[in-house]
Amino acid sequence: MKVLVADKFEKSGLDGLAKAGCEVLYDPDLKDDALVEAIRASGAVALVVRSTKVTRPMLEAGRLSLVVRAGAGYNTIDVETASERGISVANCPGKNAIAVAELAFGLILALDRRIPENTADLKRGVWNKKEYSKARGLYGRTLGLIGLGGIGREVARIGEGMGMNVIGWNRTKHPEIAVPLVDIDALLARSDVVSMNLTLGDETRGFLSAERIARMKKGAIYINTARGALADETALIAALQSGHIRHAGLDVFHNEPLSPDHVLAKLENVTLSAHAAFRTPEASETLLRRAIDIVKAIS
């Protein structure tokens, strides 16, 4: 099987595809028209990507029968066109759950203890021990999880270990979910920290609407390591500016990369991360192994 890899992957993953008997064509910088032409010219039957968008012209360009996204979602792939053309689409859900949960909790701790602000002050020569001793702390606080897939359950596990009261809302009931489930309004009203863990789709886009943001507990922390479009950006900014949401930790945005001129980049009560939650070496290796398994199963 000829496999075109159009995103950045570790050598171990490329070697794994080769060992599986694949002819590997690797060009991590292919995008847009260049990727369309590469699919057409290469005759590849499988395309492996990470964050690269896979559009209708790409799917119509050549002989593709499989697209694998080495990640949890598939919103970057034109699934409708793939279905029309009989092209299989696969992703790797849950394989980066631990890495994403670790960053989510890193943001929670950083915001509660105001670590970014404290660091900035110290680097300016400002010693403000009294101010930065006012953290609320997490023990006994309520952590509300919107979405309890693999990542949400990992965040829950860490939160419980920190002594937090964990509650959750999920689109479906699942036997693996041990977290107490509540309706979304109750979760927003009760949670000191709200962590967004939904996948992005037509039913979840804008899930955290202006109305729902208004129902959040005043002074709550908001964490999003899932997708920026799950929340109403305008309403989120307004809530941060008014102090209704005390702090936000964001790894994802409506438009990426985030412009330094964007309002979110200028707010002092927002801590930012460059969509890096899942990109630890261990998580990348796990994703690659799963992607290899999918290609091997199809070939």
Image (cartoon, helix red, strand yellow):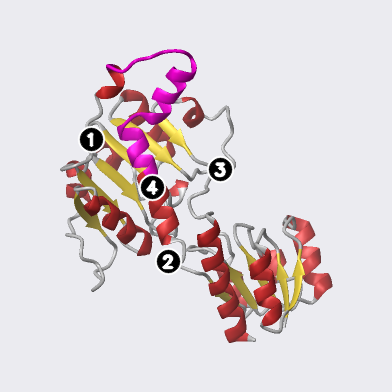
Name which of mark 1 and mark 4 comes first in the sequence. 4
Query: Which residue carries the number 4 mark?
Result: 104
Query: Which residue carries the number 2 mark?
Result: 94
Give coordinates of residue 188: x percent, y percent: 23, 44
Q: Quadrant of the C terminus?
A: bottom right
Label 4 sits on what residue type?
Answer: Ala
Query: Which residue carries the number 1 mark?
Result: 137
Task: Measure the C-alpha gap from mark 3 to mark 1.
Answer: 32 Å
> Is residue 75 in view from this perspective?
no
User: Disc 3 on helix, strand or loop?
Assistant: loop
Name which of mark 4 and mark 2 comes first in the sequence. 2
Q: Nearer the viewer, mark 1 or mark 4?
A: 1
Q: Are marks 1 and 2 in contact (CB under 8 Å)?
A: no
Q: Are marks 1 and 4 in contact (CB under 8 Å)?
A: no
Give coordinates of residue 35: x percent, y percent: 75, 61
Residue found 56% across the figure and 37% down from its top: 258
